[in-house]
Amino acid sequence: MSRWIFVLALLLAPAAPATATFSIVAIDPATGDLGIAVASRYFAVGAVVPWADAGVGAVATQAGVNVGYGPRALELLRQGLTAQQVMDRLFAEDTFPGKDARQLAIVDAKGNIAVFTGDAANQWRGHVKGKTWSAQGNILVGAHVVEAMGRAFDRTQDELAEKLFAALKAGDEAGGDSRGRQSASILVVRKGGGRNTNNDRYVFVNVDDHQDPIHELRRLMNLQMTINHNGAINRALTAGTFASALVSSEKVATYQPLDPAQHVRVGFLAYLAGQPDRALAAFARARELTLPAQFKALWEAQASRPAYSKVLEDKAFVAKVLTDPQPF
């Protein structure tokens, strides 16, 4: 009797959830950055779908997912196979059931893209491919999800991580996974671009379980991108490339828009980059976000940096910055 109870329990047990996702894999030809963004009504999708290696390629494996496709694809790409050759080899080697339900997208370091959606993947299923990207999904509300992702990617004039996020957000706003929301992930790799030493993961942010994973992903990305661009500012200042430092400083100010210290730094760097009007606007914004005494303290704290000494030599400019209708 106990054996029959066990069999009945197996029959009545809920089936494992399908790995329904909408994802995008892409390359930035200018920088060589490679990445994936993915979201799903599935727990911890970032632990399953995205795989990438700097200078090698990026892979999204989903639907009737064979997780082994990720590391094996990167191994084959390192051997010099193209994205399509890798895909062909993966399917030839796959001895697990359900190959016709798989969905797979690969971009290699040369910009070649291969994508497959199996006929047995759950509807709606499909993909669209652009010049530098492929967007794909299954159990979606419709084809317009991946189409919206591609449009958002192409029209976003920014670095790869931001283009991927824009695509993911557009897919979510278009309806995304027909079952709802739960998790999201972005992985971008860049040689030597990660935190600390010997790390190529420029961005690797995961939201494993959240009612609004895209919004939470944005919050976490702001923190990660702030770290990335603070590092870029320090490197640029060391090299004396103020224009590059200004670009990253303005990025940080967009990620931390209510932090007056970020706008003060933009002001100093804009002046050094030869943009005094931009500098005055940044200092004015910092003043708007603080009390007069706080602004003066922020100014003095940053003005003490040797890299900014040239700003202090321009007495007329300094007077414009420090003149306030309400005295300190």
Image (cartoon, helix red, strand yellow):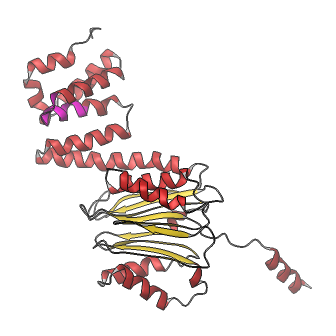
Whether residue 165 is visible, yes or no, is no
Q: In the picture provided, is 149 more to the left or to the right than 280? A: right
**Which residue is found at the position 23% from the left and 61% from the top?**
30
Query: Farthest residue in the top direction?
Result: 326
Determine the main secondary structure of the stretch shown in magenta.
helix
**Which residue is found at the position 59% from the left and 69% from the top?**
19
**Which residue is found at the position 15% from the left and 28% from the top?**
276
Q: Is residue 23 above or below residue 313?
A: below
**Total tally of numbered discs in the picture:** 0
Q: In the picture provided, is 212 more to the left or to the right than 282? A: right
Q: Is residue 258 magenta?
A: no
Q: Nearer the viewer, residue 103 or 149?
A: 149
Quadrant where the C terminus lies? top left
Quadrant where the N terminus lies? bottom right
Q: Position of residue 149 (x, y in %)?
A: 46, 57
Q: Is residue 288 above or below residue 156?
A: above
Q: Position of residue 156 (x, y in %)?
A: 36, 50
Q: Is residue 298 above or below residue 143?
A: above
Q: Nearer the viewer, residue 174 or 88?
A: 174
Q: Nearer the viewer, residue 96 or 5?
A: 96
Q: Is residue 54 above or below residue 85?
A: above
Q: Is residue 273 magenta?
A: yes
**Which residue is found at the position 13% from the left and 21% from the top?**
317
Range drawn in magenta: 265-276
Whether residue 105 is visible, yes or no, is yes
Q: In the picture provided, is 226 more to the left or to the right than 62? A: left
> Image quadrant of residue 307?
top left
Q: Position of residue 203 (x, y in %)?
A: 37, 57
